[in-house]
Image (cartoon, rainbow, N blue to C red):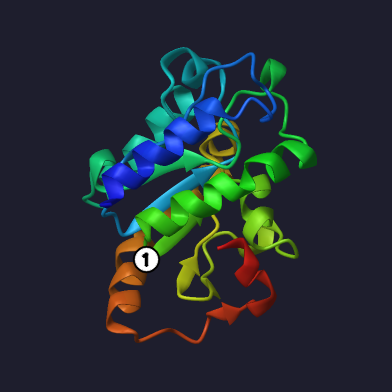
Amino acid sequence: MNKEEQLNGLYKKMVADTSLPLQWSNLVFGEGSINCDVMFIGEAPGERENELSRPFVGRSGKLLDKLIESIGWKREDVYITNIVKRRPPINRDPLPEEIWAYKSYLAEQIRIINPCIIAPLGRFSMNYFLPNAKISRDQGKVFKIKDKFIVPLFHPAAALRSTAMNEALQESFKKLPAIVKKYKSTQFSEEVAIFPEQEKLL
């Protein structure tokens, strides 16, 4: 099966899996290029995302779109999803057991799409891949897990609340094209840190 067929199969499997938590809300699977270089991964859908069954379409999504466009890319050039695929009540943070329940589906989604770069958006998404990382210290840095670069970034929602975070996020986005280029040329920079114990997540 090609990528599109595999993703359709994964989507149907998730719809049929009634053991997954947050069944009251809509499934927000993900969207974008299935042949992307960069895959952005948030924590969970919000109210607007639940209404439209699309990731990052509210205020945070509008900022994410602007950031993507600021480096000469388009939203349809990347893939956007969340770890947890359904909205937690009142937009609360996802619980550890909810992240655990959805993680095998995220791992399969990553395997199928096979991006060069995974860009976790926010602390919860970052700590899924890098449990010892701190978002204030490590956002914008480059880490390596197996054959992937992980570039944690501030969540757009946090950037909307803080001018300093917004500026830092803009600077980190400017680095993404060069990181993709380095990945493809295998000329990895010295700032890459290797976390082999995290290989089971991908």
Residue at x-position 60% and y-position 46%: 122
Picture coordinates of residue 161, whole percent (x, y): 60, 32
Residue at x-position 37% and y-position 60%: 115
- Taking depth in this image into account, of 6 and 48 the one nearest to the observer is 6
Picture coordinates of residue 121, whole percent (x, y): 54, 46
User: In the displayed structure, does residue 11 sit left or right of residue 125?
Assistant: left
Residue at x-position 48% and y-position 30%: 60
- Taking depth in this image into account, of 151 and 113 the one nearest to the observer is 113
Residue at x-position 29% and y-position 50%: 3
Q: Is 176 located above or below residue 158 in the figure? A: below
Disc 1 element: loop
Res 34 visible? no
Q: In which quadrant is the C terminus drawn?
A: bottom right
- Taking depth in this image into account, of 34 and 132 the one nearest to the observer is 34
Look at label 1 and name its amino acid.
Cys
Picture coordinates of residue 156, whole percent (x, y): 51, 38
Res 125 visible? yes
- Residue 105 sits in quarter: top right
User: In the displayed structure, does residue 112 sit left or right of residue 184?
Assistant: right
- Residue 180 sits in quarter: bottom left
Picture coordinates of residue 40, whole percent (x, y): 44, 48
- For label 1, count other residues whose C-alpha is less than 10 Å away and answer few (under 14), some (14-19) or many (20+): many
Q: Name the residue carrying label 1.
A: 116
**Count of numbered circles on the image:** 1
